[in-house]
Image: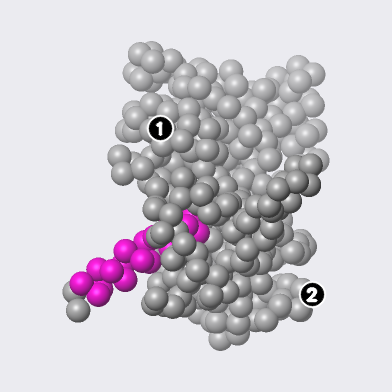
Amino acid sequence: MLAKSSTELIRQRNSLLVLAALRRHGALAHTDVSDHTGLSSATVSAITADLETAGIIEKSEQQPAGGRGRPRVLLRQRRDCAYLAVVIITSDGVEYSLVDYSGRLIDRFNEQRSHDPAGAGLFLEVIGQGLERLAERSRIERDKLLIISISSKGLVDKTRPILLWSPIFGADRIDFDAGLKSRWKGRVMLANETLLVAAALGEEEEKRHSHKHYALAALSLGHSIGLGIARMTPLGEMDLTASNFGHMMHQPDGALCRCGARGCVEAYAGFYAILRTAFEVRLDTIPAKFVPLSEMDKIAQRARQGDRMAGFAFRQAGLALGNGLSRLLSLTEPMPVVITGVGTRYYDLMRRGVEEGFAQSHIGRLSGLPEIQIAADERNLVYQGHLRHAFAEMDRSIVMAGALSSG
């Protein structure tokens, strides 16, 4: 019995290796699968035969260049095997995407969100309606929607899809599984948005440098301040963490934050904080729930034209970010920082403050500012992080569910 269990585990592991290779490299020939996975040709033949019989992968022919010779047989995921719904909750709306098993985008639409107070129950109803619309527009079989992957800024329960705190809903907890499971059989997953950004950036780093060790931090600037870290472990696996960076202490008894505390990094670096400082509003004023980009652009224009308070507001934001990064990197290994989010359009106004804030620390004086890169297209990074996170789980669930024949 033990031998049979061990054989089954090995077969499942090999199946996941094959699916991971197809996921990472696209359609592959038999020999390419063997090269990428390190599995023998015979093992690849057995595994791919099982996957094909189960309707998980399929074969296609690629004609050789010039039209001469035998066609090349490629293996790829079967598109209609399963589907993924991606739900990205932003400060001003919700984006819904439907993706087939091969990773191809089928449908996408956005819905604006009201900034009036709304409870968790009402919001869950809105999400449920959005998912209904997504399925109806594409006419997919509902039972084939295996995963609903949701992301938001804020604190996420590590074991269950529960949003513990968010800039949008505050301490109003949202249990997505409880709210959606009555209408959807697919597994509900929830992730911190900036953690997904770090995952996408980490995957790009892996593709560039194979299995070389790396570590990087993704710092998201905007209405909220978020940070995620991706690093490769000694076992060659990606380790992801999302610290509560935006609500780290920056100034004791300082400016009022949206979380209700005083002196957080976000209370100086978030959009509402920059607005408050630029207009010399009292630091204990209740933060604005939402600041339109058009308003931020006006403040930035004033700063670039030499307005003293507008420039000071962005410098203060940079100072808080620099201080926060120095504390973070004092506790971790040195790593490059990739700055993302809509706030990247104002980073030129924050740069001096970031440099000054980091230089005030011991690590700053010893090693200087870490390498800083800009990745403005945060939305696409969030989406790519969803695909990586959700499809790895979908492949695992399909294989572990025993969908393959035991032969």
Q: Which residues are magenta?
A: 3-21
Give whichever of 48, 107 is nearer the camera: 48
Q: Which residue is mark 1?
A: 212
Is 343 within the magenta? Answer: no
Q: Assign the N terminus to one quadrant of the image.
A: bottom left
Which sits earlier in the primary sequence, circle 1 or circle 2? 2
Q: Estimate the spatial distance between the alpha carbons at disc 1 and disc 2, rounded to whole Å.
A: 43 Å
Left or right side of 401 for 116: right
Q: Amino acid at mark 2?
A: Arg
Decide which of 167, 77 is in the foreground and name it. Answer: 77
- Quarter of image, res 150: bottom right
Label 2: how many residues lie within 10 Å, few (<14), some (14-19) or many (20+)? few
Res. 137 mark: 2
Location of residue 259 in the rendering, given as x and y in whole percent from the top left corner: 50, 52
- Residue 2 location (% of width, % of height): 19, 74
Residue lying at 51% horizontally and 49% vertically, measured from the top left: 31
How far from the left and from the top, in percent, is residue 268? Answer: 56, 35
In magenta stretch: residue 17: yes
**Relative horizontal placement of residue 397, taking residue 6 as reference (left or right):** right
Q: Nearer the viewer, mark 1 or mark 2?
A: 1
Q: Main secondary structure of the magenta part?
A: helix
Q: Amino acid at mark 1?
A: Lys
Give me the residue at 50% from left, 17% from top. Answer: 356
The residue located at (46%, 45%) in the rendering is 35
At horizontal 67% and vertical 23% (from top left) the residue drawn is 349
Front residue of 114 and 177: 177
Q: Residues within 10 Å of mark 1 (few under 14, many from 20)?
A: few
The spot of residue 40 in percent (x, y) is 39, 53
